[in-house]
Image (cartoon, coloured by chain):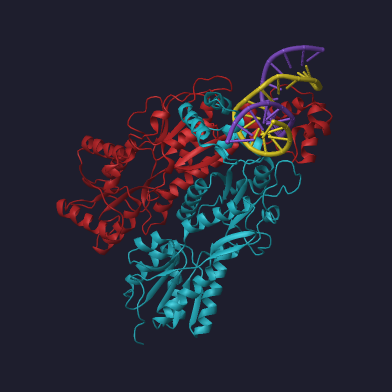
Chain colours: A cyan, B red, C yellow, D purple
Amino acid sequence: MVTLAEVAQHAGVSASTVSYVLSGKRSISANTRQRVERSIHELGYHPNAGARALASSRSNIIALMIPLRTDMYVPVMMEIAIAMATTARTHGYDVLLLTGEEGPDAVRRVSGSGLADGMILMDVELDDERLPLLRGGGPPARAKSRVGDDQPAVLIGLPADTAGLTCVDLDFKATGALCVEHLAELGHRDIAVIGEAPAVYERHTGFAERTLDGLRGRARELGLRLLHRPCEGGYDAMSVTLARILDERPGTTGFVVQNESAVEPLLALLRQQGRAVPEDVSVVAICPEQVAVQASVRLTSVAVPAQEMGRLAVEQLVAKLDGRGGDEVVLIAPELTVRASSGPAPAP
Amino acid sequence: MVTLAEVAQHAGVSASTVSYVLSGKRSISANTRQRVERSIHELGYHPNAGARALASSRSNIIALMIPLRTDMYVPVMMEIAIAMATTARTHGYDVLLLTGEEGPDAVRRVSGSGLADGMILMDVELDDERLPLLRGGGPPARAKSRVGDDQPAVLIGLPADTAGLTCVDLDFKATGALCVEHLAELGHRDIAVIGEAPAVYERHTGFAERTLDGLRGRARELGLRLLHRPCEGGYDAMSVTLARILDERPGTTGFVVQNESAVEPLLALLRQQGRAVPEDVSVVAICPEQVAVQASVRLTSVAVPAQEMGRLAVEQLVAKLDGRGGDEVVLIAPELTVRASSGPAPAP
DNA sequence: TTGAAAGCGCTAACAC
DNA sequence: GTGTTAGCGCTTTCAA
């Protein structure tokens, strides 16, 4: 293993000079810099991560806590994680992967050991037990100060109380409103919303309820009728749900679906019943881009902007670690892409 | 932040004693141990990761390199990653997430900096450019030895040449054989294989070819006719592929599908053509459990054992890091689960 | 069974 | 613009 001291000797300079060439924290003559860089290259030097962390009390690692439960939005989570790792690298950070398994202890372990400089939590629940440990986590405490052992953190998703927290999420309320608007413009008056599984609403996962707020609010404003039904994924559940909806509101011509695993069953069932999409009924989905594009009918949809969420979360966290930027709630504006599944409402 | 020295003082012992209580590397009197443990608890002490890494030249971190390309098997990758993180924790390790983006440089960076003690690579290509850096990576070099800066590693998937490498994978050849056997037992004589996208075969990703070997070999042994066609996912591609297959081999009654995004389109198309599953044709899938269970017909399938792959990979790596176990290829035996998509071949 | 002390490789004052 | 040096918090010999 090559050490900084060896590089220094090889280049004929002192250790600190090499260190400063690396960090850019003081000016170096062009000549010296070149010699040092050449030595670094020739010797294949890589600074030792542990030593660096010890001396600087910065690990240059960001911890990412993902939920153990992998039943929802898995590809999206993966996309977010990858976007994070990529973005983190451009800021000089690596990403440590933690599962929710350890619960709040993981937060204590990571922050207590200085393993990571900050953390990003995905799939936060409305009243998450890890939140108290995170509130007010400002910029990191430097070496000698005994204050502020709290962990700088960014959440993906919104808990009930965002005070003292930085959060990044899609603006689900605006998303709901946008879907309703689109259908209203096309002349649809009776809209059915096929939601996530009941368990999701019971867990009070924020996004589902916020979407509903947006849907209902705009429907009221525009004078539309809106019926919301949670739905487990799969063909059987969707079949029952659809039958009930059409029974209760036979005039339904617009559907909003927020449930990946109900999308394809819905399309199949509509087809089976002789209802053509988009001639007879229109379908708008809130789902990952990939699902919308690969469905049997290319779906008009609002995509969950996974990459942007990952990127933004990292950038917010890095800003905090650099002492810039404070606690903020960053909502990403939804974008609706019109594809083949929505069209003018049929004449009554 | 609480340091080991503070714990020592609080417990009225020396620093080394605290260290040994933590590591268990020498015997401690019950009395002393208790006092130390109590102090650790009371002060909320967590050993500093950087200091520990520097002094011991072990980071207790495993690096996981995942491919950037997220077009294939994403939920499976996630499941593997989570299983790894969970298993790693039980052995005292954390997992660092690297994307393939940096290529071979990531290997150099991580091993050169001592960021991780070992690494696991997913989705290795047959002739991966990172492999030369990994071959023969035995147990880690200890602090002062200048030898062996190579990185202990485990691959998920098999490259062309496994010499000097430890690999974990599903036994895809046996998987192919198993699928053919199942269909043969049910009396099917004409079998069509719907494979991954052509690009997957062109990249020479090992698993696709090994599956094909198994399928063809057993078909030959059992005297069955086998037709293999790669297929892009989605309805349109599947439609074209299916038409060609039935054109070329109208007597086909058995299908083996190894392509997540072709599964549902295939079922829909068969239904549409009035071919009942499993009365007229049988379908066997090689896919994640979830896909098999959630499909519109519950699929007879061989599951990709994601969790076990993740767990085994970590255990192999930990064994290497402990100086136990050498280079091995660990193949997981496939298991076929019979569900509703396969049945006796129709009378001719 | 325990303590004292020498580093591990790097950063960041402080000095010139 | 560059060098000297004192730690960072821990592990591990060596000595008792």
Q: Nearer the viewer, residue A221 or B289?
A: A221
Reply above or below: A259 against B331: below
**Residue B58 visible here:** no
Quarter of the image with the N terminus of chain B in it: top right
Q: Nearer the viewer, residue A219 or A92?
A: A92
Locate residue B34: give its quadrant. Answer: top right
* Number of marks drawn: 0
Residue A322 as seen in the image, left or right of residue B128: right
Residue B292 as seen in the image, left or right of residue B139: left
Residue B227 as seen in the image, left or right of residue A87: left
Locate residue A106: give its quadrant. Answer: top right
Q: Position of residue B333 (x, y in %)?
A: 40, 35
Residue located 42% across and 26% down the image? B328
Reply above or below: B148 against A236: above
Q: Position of residue A333 (x, y in %)?
A: 50, 68
**Residue A159 visible here:** yes
Q: Position of residue A305 (x, y in %)?
A: 47, 61
Residue, far left: B248
Reply above or below: B201 against A69: above
Q: Nearer the viewer, residue C10 or A216?
A: C10
Q: Position of residue A279 (x, y in %)?
A: 32, 78
Q: Nearer the viewer, residue B348 or B241?
A: B241
Residue located 41% across and 71% down the image? A284
Locate residue A19: give its quadrant. Answer: top right
